[in-house]
Image (cartoon, rainbow, N blue to C red):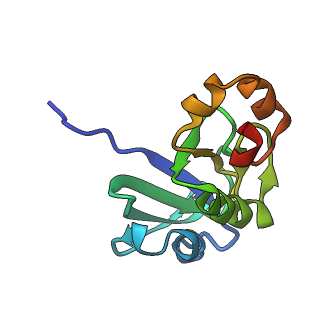
């Protein structure tokens, strides 16, 4: 019986190359992203394709990339990134939304359309404060000091 589930994400890049995607995430995650060698898969129904196994924050993922879009990412799947403080929230939020888009309640999407929830580690505690939920519903990026 399997003892692990490995999420697989299917990206699209104009050239069908994985390297630009790896470089984009390496720029924000630095040493928290470990990348194995990129495997070319050749041309398929969705154009040129490549695949790579990565470790992001010590969790395994498979990433695949094709030159033509297969199915776009949407809100049905997001990656939750609990942050220790406002500086971490700002770091990830500002990077992903620079070429991506802001949403509500700590949600945003990066330039590849992948959805992220950039939240404080203690979000449950903040939401338990008076008007905590009301405060969050008015925010795009979570601003911790607003919950004081």
123 left or right of 2? Answer: right
Looking at the image, can residue 111 be seen?
no
Q: In the current view of this chain or complex, which residue is farthest to the front?
A: 148
Q: Decide if residue 58 is on the left or right side of residue 85.
A: left
Task: Depth check: give the residue in front, 118 or 130.
Answer: 130
Measured from the top left, where is residue 63 in percent x and y? Answer: 47, 58
Residue at the image position 56 percent from the left and 29 percent from the top: 124
* Figure check: 61 above or below 52: above
| Quadrant including the N terminus | top left
Query: Residue 106 appears at what percent x and percent y?
Result: 70, 43
Res 126 visible: yes
Up the image or down, 141 lies above or below 20; here it is above
Please identify the residue farthest to the right as the structure is shown: 138
Q: Nearer the viewer, residue 29 or 24?
A: 29
* Extreme residue toward the left, this view: 1
Give the percent coordinates (x, y) of residue 137.
Answer: 80, 30
Q: Is residue 42 left or right of residue 131?
A: left
Count up the numbered dots: 0
- Percent of width and height locating residue 82: 52, 47
Q: Is residue 104 left or right of residue 110?
A: right
Q: Residue at x 73, y 25 (%)?
A: 133
Q: Residue at x 81, y 53 (%)?
A: 101
Quarter of the image that includes the C terminus:
top right
Query: Along the line of sight, which residue is nearer the eye, 103 or 13?
Result: 103
Which residue sits at x=19%, y=35%?
A: 2
Q: Quadrant of residue 65?
A: bottom right
């Amino acid at each position: 019986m399997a003892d692990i589930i490995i999420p697989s994400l299917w990206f699209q890049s104009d050239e069908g190359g994985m390297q630009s995607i790896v470089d984009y995430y390496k720029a924000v995650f630095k040493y928290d992203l470990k990348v194995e060698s990129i495997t070319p898969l050749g041309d398929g129904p969705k154009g040129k394709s490549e695949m790579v196994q990565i470790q992001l924050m010590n969790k395994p993922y498979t990433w695949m990339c094709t030159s033509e879009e297969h199915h776009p990412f949407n809100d049905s799947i997001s990656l939750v990134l609990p942050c220790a403080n406002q500086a971490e929230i700002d770091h990830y939020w500002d990077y992903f939304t620079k070429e991506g888009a802001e949403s509500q309640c700590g949600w945003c999407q990066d330039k590849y359309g992948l959805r992220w929830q950039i939240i404080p580690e203690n979000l449950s505690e903040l939401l338990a404060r008076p008007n905590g939920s009301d405060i969050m519903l008015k925010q795009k990026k979570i601003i911790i000091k607003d919950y004081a």
